Image (tube, helix red, strand yellow):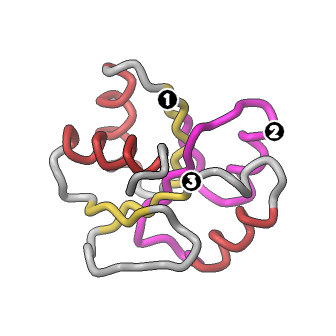
Amino acid sequence: MNLLLIENNPEFSSVFEPYFQEYGHTVVTVFSAEDAVLAAGTWRPDAVLIGCPHPGLRRTISGIRREPILGNLPLIVLSCDPGDREDGVAAVIDKSALLSDMEKQILRAAEGRA
């Protein structure tokens, strides 16, 4: 699966990327919604992951939804607060979950079974 990660925490992406790559997924990490649109213009993700806390999360989600390239993709918020909930996202997944559990949840959400 091709995963586009919008993450402003290098510590999280440095753990996340190698784990998912080891299991056959491709991960491209960017730092803003604008960068996500640029990346998706040359590479087609299957899902967009947004790391939280993310400045301007609602603006990022609505901006992505307006983009033809990204608008119909599942958006998955990776949060330190499992109580987070945002309109327009397929799932909210706790960042502190085991990576193997996180992978299962991401795959379910990307397939529309969140």
Measured as percent of width and height from the top left, residue 24 is found at: 40, 19
Q: CA distance from mark 2 to mark 1?
A: 17 Å
Q: Position of residue 96 (x, y in %)?
A: 19, 58
Residue 44 shown in magenta = yes
N-term-proximal mark, 3 vs 1:
1
Quadrant in the picture for residue 79? bottom left
Q: Is residue 69 left or right of residue 5?
A: right
Q: Which residue is mark 3?
A: 74
Residue under circle 1?
Answer: 1
Q: Residues under labels 3 and 1: Cα distance? A: 12 Å
Is residue 93 rendered to the left or right of residue 26? left
Few, some or many C-alpha atoms within 10 Å of disc 3 (few <14, some 14-19, many ≥20)? Answer: many
> Which residue is at a point 15% across and 47% down the rendered structure image?
98
State the CA–CA distance, disc 2 to disc 3: 17 Å
SS for dot 1: loop
Q: Secondary structure at mark 3?
A: loop
Marks 2, 1: nearer the viewer: 1
Q: In front: mark 2 or mark 3?
A: 3
- Label 2, secondary structure: give it: helix
Residue 71: numbered disc = none
Task: Tell me residue 107's x, y (percent).
Answer: 39, 41
Q: Give the residue pinned by disc 2.
A: 41
Check disc 2: other Cα within 10 Å, few if <14, some if 14-19, many if 20+: few
Kind of residue at disc 2: Gly
Stretch in magenta: 28-57
Determine the residue located farthest toward the left in the rendered image.
98
